[in-house]
Amino acid sequence: MNFINSTRQQLNILLMIALMILSPLLSAQNKAVSISANDELNFGMISNENGTCRMNDQGILSGLNGQTCMGTGTSASFQLSGTKYYSIFILVAGGSSNGVSLTPVIVGASSRVLDNKGKSTLNIVGDLVLNNVSEGSLSLSYSVSVNYE
């Protein structure tokens, strides 16, 4: 009986120590993930030929399916900020207007861990699909969503 009480007391002490250590971690509030834009996605000047203009992760353009774009564009760059070391998941969705569709592509993994300062850089490239487009300047929208996993 004495041995059981002693073991129970030791377990209670260990449980209290564990709670003291874990309590600040469990009660820490997550900061919302914030996104700030550094650079806009820019394909530059391309022809109005039907087809796809693809930007790779270095910004190099290549034409597919009849599109003859070439050269270098600018990938979009965003600074993500939140709680350090937390896992995040990133989603992107494209848009279209006047015969042009944008399919954004995340450079690197869509699932990542924020660094010791709670930061990560997100770069986005993608495909522009042109279908019977008139000449001129065009802006397209796309969305970026970042969530804690």
Image (tube, helix red, strand yellow):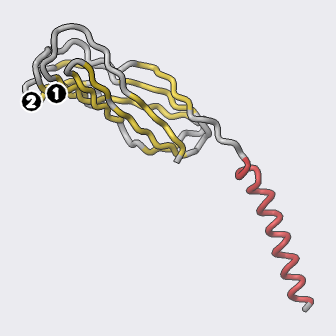
Q: Which residue is mark 1?
A: 52
Label 1 neighbourhood size at 10 Å, few (<14), some (14-19), many (20+)? many
Q: Residue furthest front?
A: 98
- Image coordinates of residue 6 in percent, x first then y, are 89, 82
> Relative to 32, is 136 on the left or the right?
left
Q: Is residue 83 above or below residue 4?
A: above
- Please state which of residues 133 and 14 is positioned toward the viewer in this rendering: 133
Q: Residue furthest left?
A: 66
Q: Which residue is mark 2?
A: 65
Are the two marked residues, 2 and 1, in contact with CB atoms closer than 8 angstroms? Answer: yes
- Image coordinates of residue 130 in percent, x first then y, are 17, 23
- Image coordinates of residue 119 in percent, x first then y, are 55, 34
Q: Residue furthest bottom?
A: 1
Which residue type does callout 1 highlight?
Answer: Thr
Label 2 neighbourhood size at 10 Å, few (<14), some (14-19), many (20+)? few
Residue at 35 percent across and 35 percent down: it is: 107
Q: Is residue 26 above or below residue 60?
A: below
